[in-house]
């Protein structure tokens, strides 16, 4: 029976129990039952305690001395009866311990005096009185049950029940111990009730902690000290389970335990056992994982080592090595400690004993016992020194002497404080210098950035001005096909604007008159463009002739294994070079008569090598010009004759019989079999032309008009300018060449296809900034790891494209709405350019085969050739 008045506890005995558990009943509110195995006892007597909160004990009404005496007498009588019954039972090896009644009485009196002194200074409330009465009644009932059950229980199956009365929150607790009986000592270990704590708890003692991982129910057993806190247990399991510290918490007796509590605070005694539950704060998203303890590696006792012989592998042998366990602890020869984790790392030491150096032959003496032989030697210093002092009869002047007076004494603390102040001052100025340097760097960076933005703005403005100036020059002096397309496009744009203005401002006869005037103006502009075209054709004709001659006379070139290019002249290229020089000579102006006659003679000897109608006509014209020159005819009158000679000689140069290098540069091949394969019929001009004169778009299924007819139709009706899209296509192909991944689709697109992609799919503007200037827009890959295609591209400005290429993950750079918008445009482009994959695959196959086919193909199938007229 537990002593409720704070009396000294008597010895309480736990009997042997192998596979049975003891149920502990907590008589507060709802009954909570826990089962704990009772291990076999090794010590003669163990004690358990019934804990009653100290604050509740203090708040109880002060019992009368008579009541205390009666209770102590009853308990003493019951205790004597139990001991007598025990002595009568035959037990082998049973040990007895005598309880000292006098010592107990003295301790009871001390506890009574303490409880009386504490209860006098406290106020009693109604709620506390009710709680105290309930606790007293439950404790009395429990103790009566224990006293009644002890005599009836068998000798080997007796169990001890302890009553735990939890204290209200925030009240200190003190321990009361119940009376015990003697038990038979055994050699087996025993467990102590975790709720039985002694007043003097050793925090270095160990206890068994059972952690139940919820909801899996896995039990992890650890040996911990009583002073170890629950925070350390949480840190251990957080690192083992690889979870965050704040995602787990520990439960004790169905309630969440505070991290600052230790095992001793929870009532665990030395060699005791406690069970805690580990749960997750978010069991749905981050459940508790299965605990897998680390397995230690044990070195085997014997290993086999293969020793290599010669380089050929001969002479190799296996040696059995026995591992000798270390019998000594490695000495600490230095190391370091981690500042963050606090782990100590030691320097390695060899497993073998240090080789002892051979003993020295030189005698050595200890410093403490070494003796020195003294010798007296007279020495004379180099300088004689003397001092003079005042005495009787001698006066020494002390005018230059200085009188020194000691200052205030500086203590060690003052000295260290002075050093600390100086250090703080130095750090202050150093940090100020660092801050100034950082601010200066930020200012310089800002200035550089502003200067860079200013230069970029000036550069873009200058580029735009140069582009506008070049475009104006192209309109004023058109020379190429793109220049005339630009003129016709500007003319069409002007005509449409004028038509809209006339339709909005005029009506009836006035509108008809305005339209007639507009038609006259358009006719005049078209005729002016036609005159420019005639002049450009004359200049371009000479350029085309010189380009043809340069290609024919160019040497053969190839790159070697070292990357250097090699050039080689063949007899055919040398022949073409000679013909080019002669042609340039006969077209030179301002030559003297002798120089002209020399050029004509060289030309005559050159064409005489072949006798045909063309050469005979050239020789006849050469003789005629020479005769007229000898007669003194003016050069202005010889322009027609010289032009005829130049034209016939150019025809001579283009003939493959006379100039073999010209065969590969002619549009019409000389081999009839080749001519029959790659010739198609144009229904517009009714001509048979080579396949290179036909433009095929990505969705073409048949060969349509030739390039010349398409250009005439564009100049007459649509008047579209593809120069911008041609520039964009060149930039795209150049960027695709830089990836060097075999991209083909970008080289299959034409200007018309790119125009549809820009205007219809991407609405002619950047998808990010809605910039509409086509000269600043460019196409880049949407996913840079795949080849460019209409369904793997994005239209951006040049600055935006440079930033887009640097992206590693598209999902981090763009949102989901933007990505869905881009994918929608990719779907539209894939539906329109559905034949491009087949065309690209066909190009790859032909590149691998390196053989020609019967005609151009789309989607891997040959295009049907139209019937000839």
Image: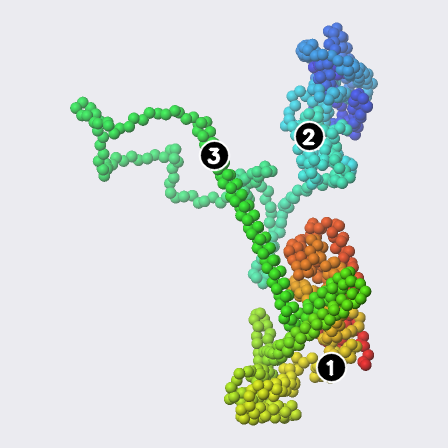
Counting from the top left corner in percent of width and height, residue 497 is at 74, 63
Q: Is residue 661 above or below residue 114?
A: below
Counting from the top left corner in percent of width and height, residue 617 is at 63, 91
Residue at position x 57%, y 75% from top? 566
Q: How is the image coloured?
A: rainbow
Camera-near label (1 vs 3) is 1
The quadrant of the rendering that contains the N terminus is top right
| Distance from Cα at disc 3 to Cα at disc 2 | 43 Å
Callout 1: 10 Å neighbours few (<14), some, many (20+)? some
Q: In the image shown, does 451 or 850 lie closer to the viewer?
A: 451
Of helix, strand and loop, which one carries label 2?
A: loop
| Distance from Cα at disc 1 to Cα at disc 3 | 94 Å
- Report whether 585 appears left or right of 817: left
Q: Quick one: which residue is furthest to the top in this view?
A: 66
1 or 3: tag closer to the N-terminus: 3
3 or 2: tag closer to the N-terminus: 2
Callout 3: 10 Å neighbours few (<14), some, many (20+)? few
Q: Quick one: which residue is furthest to the front in this view?
A: 509
Question: Is residue 830 among what the camera can see?
Answer: no
- Residue at the spot of label 1: 675
Camera-near label (3 vs 2) is 3
Counting from the top left corner in percent of width and height, residue 773 is at 68, 59
Counting from the top left corner in percent of width and height, residue 630 is at 53, 92
- Residue at the spot of label 3: 425
Residue at position x 78%, y 65% from top? 510
**Picture disc at residue 303:** none
- Residue at the spot of label 2: 259
């Amino acid at each position: 029976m537990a002593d409720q008045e704070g009396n000294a506890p008597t010895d309480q005995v736990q009997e042997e129990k192998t596979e049975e558990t003891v149920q502990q009943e907590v008589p507060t509110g709802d009954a909570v039952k826990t089962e704990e195995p009772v291990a076999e006892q090794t010590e003669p007597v163990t004690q358990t305690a019934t804990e009653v909160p100290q604050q509740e004990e203090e708040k109880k009404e002060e019992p009368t001395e008579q009541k205390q005496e009666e209770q102590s007498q009853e308990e003493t009588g019951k205790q004597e009866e139990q001991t007598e019954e025990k002595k009568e039972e035959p037990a082998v090896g049973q040990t007895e311990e005598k309880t000292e009644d006098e010592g107990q009485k003295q301790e009871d009196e001390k506890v009574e005096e303490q409880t009386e002194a504490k209860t006098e200074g406290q106020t009693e409330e109604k709620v506390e009185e009710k709680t105290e009465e309930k606790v007293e009644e439950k404790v009395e009932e429990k103790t009566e049950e224990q006293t009644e059950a002890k005599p009836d229980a068998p000798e080997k199956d007796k169990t001890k029940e302890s009553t735990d009365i939890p204290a209200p929150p925030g009240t200190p607790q003190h321990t009361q111990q119940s009376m015990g009986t003697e038990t038979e000592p055994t050699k087996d270990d025993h467990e102590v009730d975790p709720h039985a704590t002694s007043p003097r708890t050793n925090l270095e003692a160990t206890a068994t902690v059972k952690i139940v991982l919820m909801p899996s129910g896995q039990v992890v057993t650890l040996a911990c000290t009583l002073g170890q806190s629950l925070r350390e247990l949480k840190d251990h399991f957080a690192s083992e389970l690889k979870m965050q510290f704040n995602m787990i918490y520990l439960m004790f007796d169905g309630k969440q335990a505070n991290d600052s509590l230790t095992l001793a605070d929870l009532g665990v005694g030395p060699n005791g056992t406690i069970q805690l539950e580990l749960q997750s704060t978010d069991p749905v998203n981050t459940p508790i994982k299965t605990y897998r303890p680390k397995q230690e590696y044990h070195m085997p006792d014997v290993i086999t080592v293969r020793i290599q012989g010669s380089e050929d592998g001969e002479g190799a042998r296996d040696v059995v090595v026995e591992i000798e366990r270390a019998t000594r602890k490695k000495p600490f020869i230095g190391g370091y400690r981690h500042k963050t984790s606090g782990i100590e790392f030691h320097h390695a030491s060899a497993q073998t004993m240090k080789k002892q150096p051979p003993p020295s032959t030189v005698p050595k003496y200890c410093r403490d016992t070494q003796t020195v032989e003294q010798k007296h030697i007279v020495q004379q210093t180099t300088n004689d020194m003397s001092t003079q002092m005042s005495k009787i009869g001698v006066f020494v002047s002390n005018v230059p002497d200085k009188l020194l007076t000691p200052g205030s004494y500086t203590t060690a603390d003052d000295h260290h404080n002075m050093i600390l102040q100086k250090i703080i001052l130095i750090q202050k100025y150093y940090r100020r210098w660092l801050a100034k340097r950082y601010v200066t760097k930020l200012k310089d960076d800002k200035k550089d950035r502003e200067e860079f933005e200013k230069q970029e703005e000036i550069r873009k403005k200058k580029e735009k001005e140069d582009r506008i100036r070049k475009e104006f020059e192209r309109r004023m002096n058109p020379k190429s096909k793109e220049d005339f397309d630009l003129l016709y496009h500007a003319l069409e744009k002007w005509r449409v604007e004028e038509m809209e203005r006339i339709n909005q401002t005029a009506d009836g006869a006035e509108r008809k008159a305005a339209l007639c005037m507009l038609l006259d103006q358009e006719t005049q502009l078209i005729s002016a463009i036609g005159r420019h075209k005639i002049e450009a054709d004359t200049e371009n004709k000479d350029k085309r002739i010189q380009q043809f001659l340069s290609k024919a006379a160019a040497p053969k070139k190839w790159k070697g294994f070292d990357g250097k290019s090699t050039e080689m002249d063949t007899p055919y290229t040398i022949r073409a070079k000679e013909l080019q020089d002669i042609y340039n000579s006969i077209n030179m102006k301002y030559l003297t008569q002798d120089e002209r006659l020399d050029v004509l003679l060289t030309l005559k000897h050159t064409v005489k090598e072949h006798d045909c109608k063309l050469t005979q006509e050239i020789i006849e014209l050469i003789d005629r010009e020479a005769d007229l020159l000898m007669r003194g005819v003016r050069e202005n009158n010889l322009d027609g004759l010289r032009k005829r000679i130049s034209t016939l000689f150019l025809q001579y140069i283009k003939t493959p019989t006379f100039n073999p290098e010209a065969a590969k540069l002619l549009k019409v091949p000389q081999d009839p079999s080749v001519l029959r394969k790659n010739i198609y019929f144009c229904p517009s001009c009714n001509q048979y032309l080579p396949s290179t004169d036909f433009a095929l778009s990505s969705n073409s299924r048949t060969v349509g008009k030739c390039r010349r007819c398409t250009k005439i139709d564009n100049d007459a009706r649509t008047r579209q300018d593809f120069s911008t899209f041609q520039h964009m296509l060149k930039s795209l192909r150049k960027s695709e060449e830089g990836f060097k991944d075999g991209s083909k689709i970008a080289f299959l697109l034409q200007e018309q296809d790119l125009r549809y992609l820009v205007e219809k799919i991407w609405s002619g503007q950047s998808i990010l900034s809605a910039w509409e200037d086509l000269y600043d827009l460019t196409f880049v890959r949407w996913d840079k790891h795949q080849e460019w295609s209409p369904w793997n591209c994005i239209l951006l400005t040049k600055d935006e494209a440079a930033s887009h290429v640097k992206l590693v993950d598209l999902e981090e750079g763009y949102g989901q709405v933007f990505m869905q918008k881009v994918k929608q445009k990719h779907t539209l482009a894939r539906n329109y350019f559905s034949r491009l994959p087949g065309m690209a695959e066909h190009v790859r196959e032909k590149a691998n085969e390196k053989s020609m086919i019967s005609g151009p193909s789309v989607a891997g199938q040959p295009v049907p050739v139209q019937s000839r007229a």
